[in-house]
Structures are given as C-alpha cells and as structure tokens.
Amino acid sequence: MLSEIAFYGAVETGLIYGLVAFGIYLSFRVLDFPDLTVDGSFPLGAAVAAVLIMEGWNPWLATGSAVLAGMAAGAVTAILNVKLNILNLLASILTMIALYSINLRVMGRPNIALLGEETVLTPWYSLNLDYHQVPVLLFVIVIFIALILLWRFMKSETGLAMRATGANPRMARAQGIATGAMIILGVAVSNGLVGLAGALFAQSQGAADVTMGVGVIVIGLASLIGGEAVITPSTVVRALIACVVGAIIYRLAIAFALNADFLGLQAQDLNLITAVLVTLAIVLPGVRSSLVSKFTRKNA
Amino acid sequence: MISATDLRLTFGKGTPLENPALRGMSLTVNQGEFVTVIGSNGAGKSTFLNALAGETLVDSGTIIVDNLNVTKLPTHKRAGRVARVFQDPLAGTCEGLSIEENLALAVKRGQRRGLGAAVKKQYMEQFRESLSSLNLGLENRLGDKMGLLSGGQRQAVSLLMASLTPSAILLLDEHTAALDPKTAAFVLDLTTKIIHEQKLTALMVTHSMKQALEVGTRTVMLHQGQVVFDIEGKDREGLEVKDLLELFEKQRGLSVDDDSLLLG
C-alpha cells in the first residue's frame, strides 16, 4: 500500500492538477475549444512565479503575475483563432511551441531551483501540522476558492453567455452575444488557471523547469474524463467537483501503480499508465451502463 | 421600420460555382406589418433573411433598421433590433441549459451582460406567465434541461424567447417546416397570436403559398434574388394559391415548376 508521504504527495499534486482540470473543462467542455496551450502555460506560470520569487517579490504577487501571464498566453491562442481564423487546435499548438522559447527567455536558463526561498507555503509551515499536510491544506483552500468563483461566474450573465457560445454559437450570436470575445475571455481564464497551477507546482516542488509542461494536457484530460466517469457532470458545480475528484483519483492511481511492487512498474512507465487510465475512464462508463441495462432487463 | 435597398450578394464569386443569390433585392417593411415571403428553392429567401440578421454580409446595398444603418454590423450587434426563430427547432435554444437559463439569455438580447446572476428571481414571474400561455405545462419545468423537450416544444420556446424583449423586426425562417403537421399548426397559431398581441413587425419565410396567404397582412414573392410581386390589403383578400400562380406567370412570363410550392 501507499506510505503516508506518498499519499499526501499524491493528494497535493492532485489538487494542483485539479486547477488544470478546471481550465480544461472551461476550454474543452464549456467552449468546445480543444486547447493545447496548457502544455506551455503551465511551465509559463511556473517560470514567471519562480523568477519573480528569486527577484524577492512577495510569493502571492508572483503567483498572481503567473495567472496574468497564463491568461495572456490563452488570449493569444484565442485571438489567433477568432481574429486570424486559424483552426483552434492549430492555434493552440502554435502558442504552445512559441511558449517553449518564451519560457526559456523568462527563466534565462532551463530551470530555477526555489530551495530556501520564501514561497506561498512558507508561512503555513509554522502551523502545528505534519510537514506533508501543509501543502494539502493550502491547496484545498485555493482550489475551494477557485471552485466557488468559477461556479459563480458560470451562473452569471457573462458566464451563461460563454456557455451558450460553446453549445450553440449561432443561437448565441442571435441573442446578441459577441461569441469571439467570449472565446477570448474563456480561453484566457482557462490558461490563467493553468498558470496558477504551474506557479503552485513550482513552489511545492521547489523548482521550475522548462520541460515540466510536457503532457499536462493529457493529465488534465485524464482528470476531467476520470472525474466525469465518477461524478455525472449534470450541473456546473458537479462538473467542477468532478474535475477535482478526477485529478486526485488520477494521482492516487498513479502513486498506487508505481508503489505496487508486484506490478513491477517504474517511474518511466508513467505515460503508459496515464494512457491506460484515460482509456479506462473513457470506456468504463459505457461498460457500466450496458451492465446496468442488462440487469434491469433481467428484472423487468 | 426596416428597409433593404438594392441588396446584391453573390456566393463563390470567381469560381465555377458562382451563384448570385440576391440581385438587387429591395423591400420596405413598415411598423406593425406581418409580411409573408414565398419563393421557390434558390429564390433567395433564406439569404435575404440571413442578410437582415447579419449572418451573411451583402456585397452592396443598404439595410436600415429603425433609422440605423446596420449593413456592415455583425449579427450580435444587430441582435437588439432583430429577433429570429430558425428553421431547425434545435437551433434556437441550448439543449444543455435549463429552460430558465435559455429564457435568461433571451431576456438580455442585445444588452450588456455583467457578472450578476443570470437567472434572477425578478424574472421568474415573467417567465412563468409567458410559458403558461403556451399551455404545455412548461411553467412548472423551469429547471429542466432544454434537451428534454420535443422539437415542437423547443420551437414554441424559441418563439417565446424571440418575443421576450422588444425588437424592430421578428424574422421567422420557415420555422414550422421541420415539424409534424399538428405541431406546425400549433406553432403557427402561436406565432400569429404573439405577433398580434404584441403588435410585432414580422417577416415570415414559408414554403407554402397557402400558409403565406392565410396569415399576415402582406405577401411578397421572391424569384432569382428579386421581388416579383408584393400584395397587401384589398388586393390580397380572398386570393387563392392559383391566383398567386397566375400573378407570378403574368409578371414573369414563366410557369412555376416547383412542386413543393403547388402542393404546400
């Protein structure tokens, strides 16, 4: 089984990826905009936060700046799509590739270590808590606030206009909604959340690295799809909770797979496990409902 | 009042598929008029409606809605003046949103949208009242997803949404064509009722000559991107489908060969 440290570590990372899953829910589900920018905006958030913390900024201000940087990256993708009519997926790939160079420029080198620097976590260690519980507590608070804000936004006039934009753009325009502006706003907010996740990840891991974004989109999608398999996303709030639950389950499943000696899996098998988990998450709900229908037919 | 003057629009210009859809189309609709528009396939009915709504921008000509030149404005900037019901019953509403959320979207048509809650208590009375006028029991299902409703019910709600806030003109694009005959009759009745009660200015495209003469105050026939005849008042009273066909042949020296127009 998992050790206590591995368990808290998995929950901590899961909470951070929950923010990524929020962002992917916003782009993929709400706006129907397949956005791969996240592979670049995650390390961008990490890079901006790390550089500013090294400059001696307040860690929360540095984290806020990472959110703004992520939003700017998302806005670039959306503008390429909306204003220049580049296919959404391709627009996001262009931004993602460009961000690799930009992230190197921001950091000035491939990685920055934050060991010994004051991060958003530092003041919380003075609490009378176990060392591994501190990040979990802080990130639970952060993700709870993010969830409430996103939920309120989705229920607002602008949020509803955004949901209509993704679901039925022709109807949205006929209702006077500027669908282009909604896509720009939505993809920006989505990548702002991913930038936040990157900034928190760098601070909890003690380093920012230019390669840390590889596969973030797959992990986020795995969390989203996995969460939806466990909690049916029939309302906005359920969909958001599903994102968090999915991300934590995903990290726990990974930790369990890597810790289970009888499986003989090692760290390099991570991406293979991810692919298997995503496949299971996509296929299992169908299997479940066909089983259910078989049983109900028997009983009828 | 809306006036369209000398609208011209060619699809696929400079390609082998070049198709002139509007060829100098002009029409003025006065306040309170209910105009029915007929024409065979390819006459330019839908293109004309799309041009008025802003979904397609014309190559030349002007469109004026309530003293504002909207010729170059995109759909969402005209939406405050132009309300619309689509042919496809699924197109006018969002199936993933609840009935009250769909209505809340429509209540803000053409207005600024802020960060306040979209579904407000103060709307509920209005929503319930207008839904109960449909006699479909929807006033008790405000929280239900739109996708749970039938095509006819969704078209009825679309119509309601289009009339929830004032507009200079209501565009109806063959909005009963995709429904079964009974539901189509229900939606058409509802249409005339709403237009009459709220004294709306409306433009209804229809494929059926019979329907075009039965409802509305004025009938316009389009052919090859132009108005071929335009009748109202005394001239229109007592007119039958065969009279319309005669009129058309006399005007154009052509015979109508589109069966769907004759059968409709």
Image (cartoon, coloured by chain):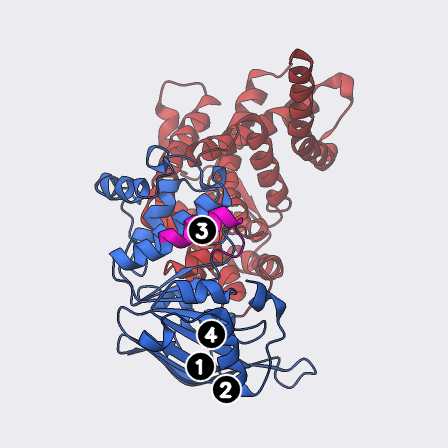
Q: Colour of chain B?
A: blue
Q: Are marks 1 and 4 on the same chain?
A: yes
Q: Which mark is nearer the camera, 1 or 4?
A: 1
Sequence-first tag of 1 and 3: 3
| Pointer 1 local density, CA inside 10 Å: few below 14, some 14–19, many at least 20 | some
Label 4 residue SS: helix
Q: Residue at (50%, 60%) from the top-left corner?
A: A78
- Spot occupied by residue A110 in the image (x, y as percentages of width and height): 60, 52
Q: Amino acid at mark 4?
A: Phe
Q: Residue at x 62, y 36 (%)?
A: A222
Q: Are marks 2 and 3 in contact (CB under 8 Å)?
A: no
Answer few, some or many: residues within 10 Å of disc 3's Cα (few below 14, many 20 plus, some between 14 and 19): few
Residues beneath discs 3 and 4 located on the same chain: yes
Residue that mark 3 sits on? B185
Which segment is the magenta one? B176-190
A126 in magenta: no
* Residue identified by numbered label 2: B251
Q: Are marks 1 and 3 in contact (CB under 8 Å)?
A: no
Instruction: Read off the chain for label 1.
Output: B
Give the spatial CA distance, label 4 vs label 2: 21 Å
Near-viewer residue (A281 or B35): B35
Distance CA(mark 1)–CA(mark 4) = 16 Å
Image quadrant assignment for residue B119: top left
Q: Which residue is mark 4?
A: B48
